[in-house]
C-alpha cells in the first residue's frame, strides 16, 4: 500500500505481480484462442504481466487451507440451490394474480475474512430470489433483498440460508482453521 | 440408441429449458412491480438459461477445444453478473426506486447514513 500525494491510498505497483494470476491469465488466453501453442502461452503470460502492472491489486490472502471435499459439497449445494430457486422465481413470475412480497434483511457474517464475504455475496447474488443490495466490509455485513417472503418466519429462514452458505464457504476455504501464526496477522 | 443420440436429446432438452427460462425472464420484467423485484426476474433465470444453453452446446458439439471456451464463458458470467446486479440494486435502493408497501421488513433504511471507511487493506 502506498499513499499518493493527495492522501488517497493505492496498492503498490511494485510486487503487484502474482504468479498464480499470471498463470491463469495465460491459460485463459489460450482457451480464448482454442490453441495451446507455445506462442499463445507466452503472449498470454506477457499480457497477464502487463494487465497486473497496469491495474495493481492487493494480494489475495487465503484464510486457510482449502478442503477439496468441502469445495465439492459447496458446488453441489450451489448448483442444487440455483436450479431449485430458478423454478421458484419462475413460479413467482407465472403467478400473476398476486404481487410478489419481498424483504430487505441484514445478515451479519460470523467470519472476518474478506474472501468469505466476497464468496457469500457472489453466491447470494447468483442464486435466484436474493440480491445483495449493500455490502459493508468494515463490519462484514450484507444487506440482502429477498423475493417471495410473506412473514417474519420467512425472513428468519432467508437469514439462516445466507448463514448456511457462509458456513459452507468457510469449510471449503478452511477459514475456520487459520494456518497463519498469530504474529503474522495484523 | 447410440450415446450420440442420447447426448443430442439431452442437448435439445437443455436448449428448450434455456428458452423457457429466457421467456420467463422477459415475462417477469413486464410483470414485477419495482426495480429490485425486476432484477430478480431479469438476471437470475437468465443466468440459469445461459448455463443450460452452454451445457446443451457442450453436449451437441462434443469438442474439447470448445469445452474450454464454454467453461470460460460460464465462469465470466458467474463472476460478473453479481457485480452488475449489486451495483444496480445499491443505486436503486439509494435512489428510492423501491415499492416500500410491498416490503415485509426493511433493515437497511434505518442504517443507510453509515459512512464506510475507504481504501484497501
Image (tube, coloured by chain):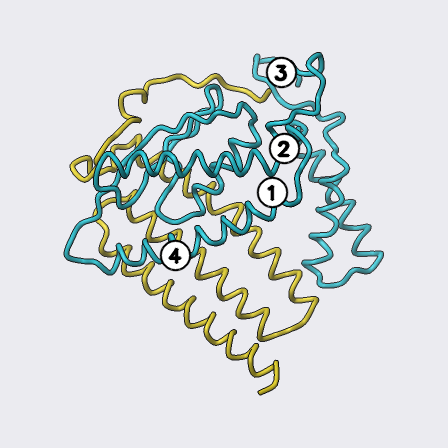
Residue B99 placement (x, y as % from top left): 20, 39
Q: Residues within 10 Å of mark 3 (few under 14, many from 20)?
A: few
Q: Which residue bears the numbered disc 2?
A: A174
**What label does residue B99 carry, if any?**
none
Q: Which chain is cyan?
A: A
Q: Residues within 10 Å of mark 4 (few under 14, many from 20)?
A: many
Q: Residues within 10 Å of mark 1 (few under 14, many from 20)?
A: some
The Cα–Cα distance between marks 1 and 3, rounded to whole angstroms, is 42 Å
Foreground label between 1 and 3: 1
Q: Is residue A32 left or right of residue A81?
A: right
Residue B94 placement (x, y as % from top left): 31, 30
The answer to which of marks 1 and 3 sits earlier in the sequence is 3
Q: Are marks 4 and 2 in contact (CB under 8 Å)?
A: no
**Which residue: 61% across, 13% down?**
A5
The Cα–Cα distance between marks 1 and 4, rounded to whole angstroms, is 27 Å
**Image height of B60 relative to A117, above or below:** below
Residue B7 placement (x, y as % from top left): 57, 77
Provide the secondary structure element on which disc 1 rests: helix
Foreground label between 3 and 4: 4
The Cα–Cα distance between marks 3 and 4, rounded to whole angstroms, is 44 Å
Q: Quadrant of the N terminus of chain B?
A: bottom right
Examine the image and state in which quarter residue B86 appears: top left
Q: Which residue bears the numbered disc 1?
A: A70
**Image height of A141 relative to A126, above or below:** above
Q: Is residue A116 left or right of residue A108?
A: right
Examine the image and state in which quarter residue A182 appears: top right
Q: Are marks 3 and 4 in contact (CB under 8 Å)?
A: no
In the rendered image of the structure, the colour used to display chain B is yellow
The Cα–Cα distance between marks 4 and 2, rounded to whole angstroms, is 31 Å
Q: Quadrant of the C terminus of chain B?
A: top right
Q: Chain of mark 4?
A: B
Amino acid at each position: 500500500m502506498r499513499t499518493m500525494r493527495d492522501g488517497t491510498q493505492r496498492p503498490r505497483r511494485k510486487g503487484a505481480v502474482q504468479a498464480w494470476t499470471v498463470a491463469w491469465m495465460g491459460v485463459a488466453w489460450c482457451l480464448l484462442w482454442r490453441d495451446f501453442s507455445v506462442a499463445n502461452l507466452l503472449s498470454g503470460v506477457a499480457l497477464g504481466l502487463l494487465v497486473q502492472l497496469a491495474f495493481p491489486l492487493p494480494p489475495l490472502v487465503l484464510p486457510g487451507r482449502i478442503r477439496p471435499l468441502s469445495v465439492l459439497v459447496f458446488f453441489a449445494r450451489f448448483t442444487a440451490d440455483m436450479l431449485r430457486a430458478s423454478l421458484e422465481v419462475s413460479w413467482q413470475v407465472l403467478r400473476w394474480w398476486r404481487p410478489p412480497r419481498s424483504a430487505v434483511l441484514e445478515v451479519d457474517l460470523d467470519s472476518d475474512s474478506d474472501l468469505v464475504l466476497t464468496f457469500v455475496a457472489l453466491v447470494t447474488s447468483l442464486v435466484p430470489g436474493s440480491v445483495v443490495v449493500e455490502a459493508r466490509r468494515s463490519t462484514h455485513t450484507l444487506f440482502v433483498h429477498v423475493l417471495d417472503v410473506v412473514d417474519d418466519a420467512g425472513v428468519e429462514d432467508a437469514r439462516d440460508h445466507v448463514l448456511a452458505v457462509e458456513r459452507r464457504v468457510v469449510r471449503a476455504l478452511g477459514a475456520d482453521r487459520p494456518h497463519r501464526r498469530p504474529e503474522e496477522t495484523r | 440408441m447410440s450415446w450420440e443420440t442420447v447426448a443430442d436429446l439431452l442437448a435439445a432438452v437443455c436448449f428448450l429449458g434455456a428458452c423457457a427460462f429466457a421467456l420467463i425472464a422477459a415475462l417477469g420484467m413486464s410483470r414485477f412491480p419495482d426495480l429490485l423485484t425486476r432484477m430478480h426476474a431479469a438476471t437470475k433465470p437468465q443466468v440459469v438459461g445461459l448455463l443450460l444453453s452452454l451445457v446443451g452446446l457442450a453436449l451437441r458439439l462434443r469438442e474439447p477445444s470448445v469445452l474450454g471456451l464454454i467453461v470460460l464463458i460460464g465462469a465470466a458470467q458467474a463472476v460478473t453478473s453479481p457485480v452488475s446486479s449489486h451495483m444496480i440494486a445499491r443505486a436503486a435502493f439509494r435512489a428510492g426506486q423501491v415499492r416500500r408497501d410491498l416490503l415485509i421488513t426493511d433493515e437497511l433504511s434505518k442504517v443507510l447514513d453509515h459512512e464506510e471507511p475507504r481504501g484497501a487493506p
